[in-house]
Image: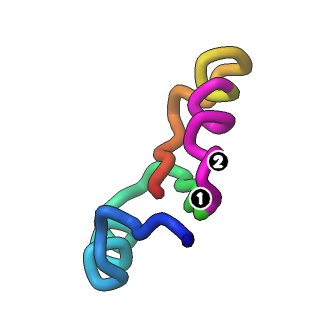
């Protein structure tokens, strides 16, 4: 069964509207882990990653 996002669709849209950071939306069970690893190892420090 897929994991549900801790944010609702409306909350995600509101977050995206009010940010100037490039944002990566991830959906897979392990995507957050992979993107956090990339963030730390290749310098995605100015990027927001949302489940």
Residue 25 falls left or right of residue 50: right
Check disc 2 and report the residue beneath it. 31
The local crowd at label 2, few if under 14, some if 14 to 19, many if 20 or more residues have their Cα within 10 Å, is: some
Is residue 41 shown in magenta?
no
Instruction: Name the quadrant containing residue 26.
Output: bottom right
Instruction: Give me the residue at 59% from left, 35% from top.
Output: 33
Q: Are marks 2 and 1 in contact (CB under 8 Å)?
A: yes
Instruction: Give me the residue at 55% from left, 71% from top.
Output: 1
Instruction: Give me the residue at 61% from left, 30% from top.
Output: 44
Check disc 1 and report the residue beneath it. 26
Residue 16 falls left or right of residue 43: left
Q: Write down the region rendered in magenta.
A: 28-37
* Residue lying furthest front: 1
Q: Which mark is drawn over residue 11?
A: none
Q: Give the vertical position of 2 relative to 50 (above or below).
A: below
Q: Give the vertical position of 26 relative to 2 (above or below).
A: above
**Element carrying mark 1:** loop
* Residue lying furthest top: 41
């Amino acid at each position: 069964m897929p994991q549900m996002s801790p944010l609702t669709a409306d909350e995600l849209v509101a977050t995206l509207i009010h940010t100037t950071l490039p944002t990566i939306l991830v959906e897979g069970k392990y995507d957050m882990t992979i993107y956090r690893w990339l963030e730390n190892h290749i310098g995605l420090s100015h990027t927001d990653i949302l489940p």
